[in-house]
Amino acid sequence: MPDERLEGLRRLLEPTKLTPTTVRFIDIAGLVKGASRGEGLGNRFLANIRDVDAVVHVVRCFSDPSVSHVEGDVDPERDVGILRTELLLADLETAQRNLDRLLKDARRGDKEAGRLAEALATIRDGLDAGTPVSRLPEAATDEEAVKRYRFLTAKPALYVANVSEEDVGGGESEWVSRVCAAAGEPEWKVVPLAASLEAELATLTPEEEAEFLDGWGLEEPGLARLVRAGYRLLDLVTFFTIKGTEVRAWTLRKGGTALEAAARIHSDMESGFIKAEVVSYDELVADGSMHGAREKGHVRTEGRESAIDDGDVILVHFH
């Protein structure tokens, strides 16, 4: 996760080790028309994404006769439509299959099965009408049913507009607009990048990367923008710890507590939690050190239910 605050802490504290937090992306084979009926990798593909937190759809937005397209030509609107349709059909099949089983159990007197069947029938009807689970009215969905059956259309999604090198640095806007319109999503959920350039960047040293980006008129790699978009999509924040000579960044859901932050660091800290000392990044840098922050009263003592904010630096006391 690109974060300038880590560099700020490096300059302030001069640690021997600096560890960023991460977002894990799993690259799997593309989704083709008919996947819900077994085409391509079919259910193997769909099984791969049932346990992820979010889905990133890479949509081709470049023409190149040397790179074939499974559908024959470049048409991002059509491709987004295929993605949405196949995921809807897969969810519809999941809903109907489990609904049939629950109805059998309900007829045998299982009240819990009856309740779930009612919830699943509502979700099934919405899917059948072409509405993803994520866009069903909140009153019409049952959180337990959505979580239990891991509906694919319930997952938040980003779109990558994979553009040509010629479109980098100015020509992406048309493609972004087209993908936004096709997906019905705001622009921040569509990240334009040229995968060919990203592949080159991955082989460069930091010094070479800076020169390469400057040559293309880019401030940062497209992957950095994608990671940030993923962070925003999943409503994540970053907090920092200082242990000995290591400064480390960690990920937490927005609104997460000091106890949850302790659990991210180590299970022993969670089970033996006493308190957390917390100071914001900005105050720590302004004060020059943890000692300076304490002297100015900027280090606060927090209990287990206290919320951790983005950029907080924390020290956990535990048994």
Image (cartoon, rainbow, N blue to C red):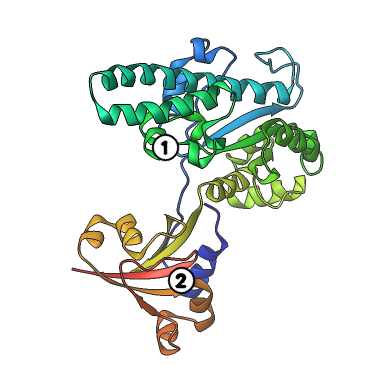
* Image side of residue 249 versus residue 29, left or right: left
Q: Residue at x 57, y 62 (%)?
A: 4
Callout 1 environment at 10 Å: few (<14), some (14 to 19), or many (20+)? Answer: some
Frontmost residue, 288 versus 47:
47
Q: Secondary structure at mark 2?
A: loop
Residue 122: x and y, percent? 47, 28
Identify whether 41 is placed above or below 120: above
Q: Residue at x 51, y 24 (%)?
A: 125
Q: Nearer the viewer, residue 69 or 148?
A: 148
Q: Residue at the spot x=55%, y=58% of the render?
A: 3
Q: Is residue 270 left or right of residue 218?
A: left
| Image quarter hosting the C terminus | bottom left
**In this view of the protein, which residue sits in the foreground, 195 or 51?**
51
Is 234 on the left or on the right of 218, as rendered? left
- Asked which secondary structure carries label 1, the reply is loop
Judge left or right: residue 113 versus residue 280: left
109 shown above or below 70? below
Pinpoint residue 203: horizontal percent, then vertical percent.
58, 39
Residue with the mark numbered 2? 14
Q: Amino acid at mark 1?
A: Asp
Q: Position of residue 72 (x, y in %)?
A: 71, 12
Disc 2 crowd rating (10 Å Cα; few below 14, some 14-19, many 20+) is: some
Q: Check the image and report above or below for 245 versus 233.
A: below
Q: Would you name the residue on which mark 1 appears?
A: 142
